[in-house]
Amino acid sequence: MAKKLKYGFIGSGGIAGIHLKELAKRKDVELVALADVSEKTMQAQGEKYGIDRLYTNYKDMLKNESLDAVSVCTPNKLHLQPTIDALKAGCHVLCEKPLAMNAREGQRMLDAAQAAGKKLVIGFQYRYNPRTSYLKQAANEGQFGNIMYGRVRALRRRGIPNWGVFGNKDLQGGGPLIDIGVHALEMAHFVMGSPKPVSAVGDIFSYIGNKPSDKIETAWKGWDYKNHTVEDLAVGRIRFENGAVLTIEAGWAAHIEESSWSFELMGDKGGCSWNPTKIFTDEAGHMVNKTPAWLGDESFDGM
């Protein structure tokens, strides 16, 4: 029988619950230990998943446990040091997105992984979604030709998180762009062939999150508007080394008809959209829209 991957967690609340739920299903993973400054949260997760090795200091966990891998599920500001410490302790690391608060921190984390000879993976699970895989294969086959332009959208009409520290810029670094926008952005960039960016420009706006939420009926009322210091809407434009251009719109609160989470690519031979999943091209002297008959199992409920 193959050796089980001994797994630990730095941060056990919020998104860690999704990691725990999925890892608990695997026969090749052993959930060994949790580390969290919140004993209440950690104990609840420990009881749910049968984990009795609990630490209020993640450094003690890394020192005392022989772990193969850890998930870092802390607020964004606390991604850097726990990730570096886990890599130095000989662990592979799955760090929740975004990787870090800025590019300098991200580079330090990548350098630490290389020095330790361990894998550092960012939580961009939608890269492996069947929709993304289908469009990536089509791009690899040359169906789009030279991709010139990409358009990314991650927009909610009203979906400002009313839990955690999502609205705290000091702890999170930003709002919807690095929360939901990065997923759609990463998928589009991946399908494009991961060209190297050479310039970027953007703008941010705050106009709803910093106001009381009790006057408009929404599913997520009661966000902490008094401490809301991140943007509600971010828009940007990236130019790549190969001449391609990509634009992005990401918002938790946008006055639009309905929420939208997708990307479109335009090439000189064809184009595509992620949701709905379609390819646009020319065949037999006509403009054709192609839709896959089946994409496989996927867990997609929008953002």
Image (tube, rainbow, N blue to C red):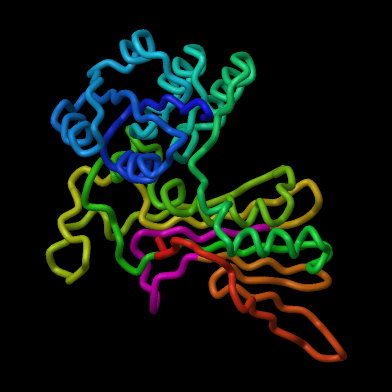
Seen from this angle, which residue lies furthest top?
Answer: 63
Tell me where residue 140 appears, x and y as whole percent: 79, 58
Residue, far front: 1
Residue 245: x percent and y percent? 70, 57
x and y, in percent, of residue 267 in the image:
78, 68
Q: Nearer the viewer, residue 65 or 144?
A: 65
User: Which residue is depicted at the point 15% across and 56% down?
Assistant: 222
Quadrant of res 227: top left
Residue 71: image quadrant is: top left
Task: Identify the residue at horizontal 58%, vertical 52% (top origin).
Answer: 127
- In the rendered image, residue 5 lying in the magenta stretch gets the answer no
Q: Nearer the viewer, residue 119 or 167?
A: 119
The outermost residue toward the right is 285
Q: Nearer the viewer, residue 90 or 247?
A: 90
Whether residue 43 is situated above or below residue 152 in the rendered picture: above
Q: Which residue is at 47% across, 39% downward?
A: 98
Number of labels in the image equals 0
> Is-magenta flag for residue 249?
yes
Numbered range of the magenta stretch: 246-261
Residue for point 59% across, 21% down: 118
- Rendering coords of residue 287 (x, y %): 77, 87
Against 156, is 109 above or below? above
Q: Where is the C terminus found, in terms of image quarters? A: bottom left
Position of 114 relative to 194 (above/below): above
Q: Is residue 303 left or right of residue 224?
A: right
